Amino acid sequence: MITIIGAGISGLTLAWWLHKEGLDVTVVESDTSVGGTMKTVRDGDWLIETGPSSALATTPLFEMLSRELDIEDEVCFSKPSAKKRYILRDGKLHMLPMSPFSFLNSGLWSCGAKWRLLKEPFISRADKEETLAQFVERRLGREFLDYAINPFVAGVYAGDPAQLSVRDAFPKLYALEKEYGSLIRGAMKKKKSSADDGSVAKNRAEMFSYRQGMQSLPLALHKALGNRVRTGIRVHTLSRFGNDTGEFIIKAEENGRAVEWMSDKIVLAVPAYTAGKCVEDLAPETADVLKSISYAPAAEIFLGYPASAVRMNLEGFGFLIPEKEKRSILGAIWTSSIFDGRMPEGHVAFTVFVGGARQPELVDQDEPALTVLAETELNSIMGIQGSPVYSRVHKWNKAIPQYRIGHGQMMNQLAKTERSMFGLYFTGNYRGGISVGDCLMQSDQLAKRIVKDQTFNTQKE
Ligand SMILES: Cc1cc2nc3c(=O)[nH]c(=O)nc-3n(C[C@H](O)[C@H](O)[C@H](O)COP(=O)(O)OP(=O)(O)OC[C@H]3O[C@@H](n4cnc5c(N)ncnc54)[C@H](O)[C@@H]3O)c2cc1C
């Protein structure tokens, strides 16, 4: 039997693919419902995403899953205008250019910053591991770092470019320099070629969700896996029976009662800090590595207004704020502009993000204070009149893992532990990318690896 600990999207997709291969899987989840970070709340006519608001169709695995789980009719694509994104500079929202012509005309960067980009193809490769900030400043210049990458990283990782490793957090960007010696040259060459595995670059992938929200996918996986998924079980520790190839003993808690069972194989599909706690006895060094991965906190404040309260044109995905603008929010998604049917008729909705690695202390405020902060910033940036008619706050004390300098070595240590401890595997968004698509691709690879290990083991017997 294979026990998968954690019924987030990583654990559930892995379970589904292993089950399809005829393997005996059980998924255990501490929460009462599945999805982990990927949860949706329906409150009357309001639909609130407390985690991912959408996914990018970067892999054909999404389409395959929708077909297999019979939820193809549930898939909804974002409105074409949601491709428009804005960045705040000097208190004004500037649209991110979508063509070379609009780039030249954009007021987001100075002429000097635009000229600076022409130097990029002539800059030599780095000779040591760099942070994203070092990499971007060296190749593209300071202004591009401040008014493109800094807000982008706050939006994706809730992170700080001065702390993230370019190689581990943005491997595709890093590979452009490594393979082509230039981001601009590399991007132009890549545009002409397509990936062998059917994957699509994030900037070209279609954005989608499901009519009833993002949790539809984990819920459909739960339904298909049936009683192979058991909720309300919190795993505490793992140990091994007998020698290095003996079965694992899992100690957990169910309804306040201690429970224990054995399993041939274990996959930890929980956040890194929990995985670290679980393997404290089994692999103490790896436990320390896992516990040292830092997570940025974030608060999401969902605000609903009558449409008449907003005068500005709301065509777009939303806006992000560079650190230099010294604001108390990271940005906002124009939720009602992306997908239809998520608010009462005649209303608009926004999701405001606060905290991240930039201002973690702001997340400690209570919910009313966070609501006022979000409301005040939206009023000031978007000129909204009056107060919201609906609000809801969701706090993530550990929202997103930060792939900092040294992350690659940590992942090597994890791989070494997997090789030396037969039957123990790790997966999750701290390994191989944080987006939902990245989680799917990683689970797909891991499923193939487990099936191969299983076949090899059966042949040996
Ligand atoms: C606020 C926010 C917004 C995001 N927005 C986007 C977006 O728009 N698009 C996108 O692609 N990605 C987005 N992401 C990232 C993406 O949602 C996550 O990376 C992904 O959902 C993580 O899935 P996972 O299965 O690896 O981990 P998790 O979702 O964390 O799942 C882990 C599971 O393990 C369970 N668990 C924990 N401890 C135990 C235990 N001891 N015993 C048993 N079970 C346990 C948890 O309850 C949970 O269900 C966002 C993330 C956040 C936080």
Image: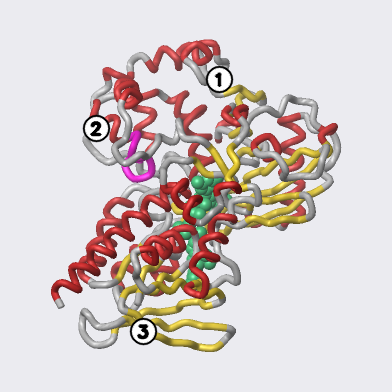
Above or below residue 49? Residue 335 is: above
Please tell me which residue lies in front, 365 or 454: 454
Look at the image and say whether residue 64 sits in the magenta stretch.
no
Estimate the spatial distance between the alpha carbons at disc 3 and disc 1, rounded to whole Å. Answer: 58 Å
Can you identify the residue that label 3 sits on?
Answer: 262
Indicate left or right for 370 with 317 as reference. Answer: right
Indicate left or right for 155 with 364 as reference. Answer: left
Q: Position of residue 17 (x, y in %)?
A: 39, 60
Give SS at disc 3. Answer: strand
Q: Nearer the viewer, mark 3 or mark 1?
A: 3
Q: Could you classify mark 3 by the number of other residues whose Cα lies within 10 Å: few (under 14), some (14-19), or many (20 or more)?
A: some
Tag 2 or tag 1, which sits nearer the N-term? 1
Q: Could you classify mark 2 by the number of other residues whose Cα lies within 10 Å: few (under 14), some (14-19), or many (20 or more)?
A: some
Q: Nearer the viewer, mark 2 or mark 3?
A: 3
Residue name at image x 29 percent, y 30 percent:
176
Please tell me which residue lies in front, 316 or 378: 316
Position of the N terminus by quadrant: bottom left
Q: Position of residue 100 (x, y in %)?
A: 46, 14
Is residue 357 visible in the rendered structure shown here? no
Task: Give the image quarter of residue 188.
Answer: top left
Part of the protein shown in magenta: 166-173
Label total for image: 3
Q: Could you classify mark 1 by the number of other residues whose Cα lies within 10 Å: few (under 14), some (14-19), or many (20 or more)?
A: many
Query: Decide: marks 1, 2 in contact (CB < 8 A)?
Result: no
Can you identify the residue that label 2 sits on?
Answer: 178
Indicate left or right for 326 with 366 as reference. Answer: left
Mark 1 residue type: Leu
Mark 3 residue type: Met
Task: Give the image quarter of residue 85.
Answer: top right
Q: In the orientation shown, which residue stands out farthest toward the left?
A: 460
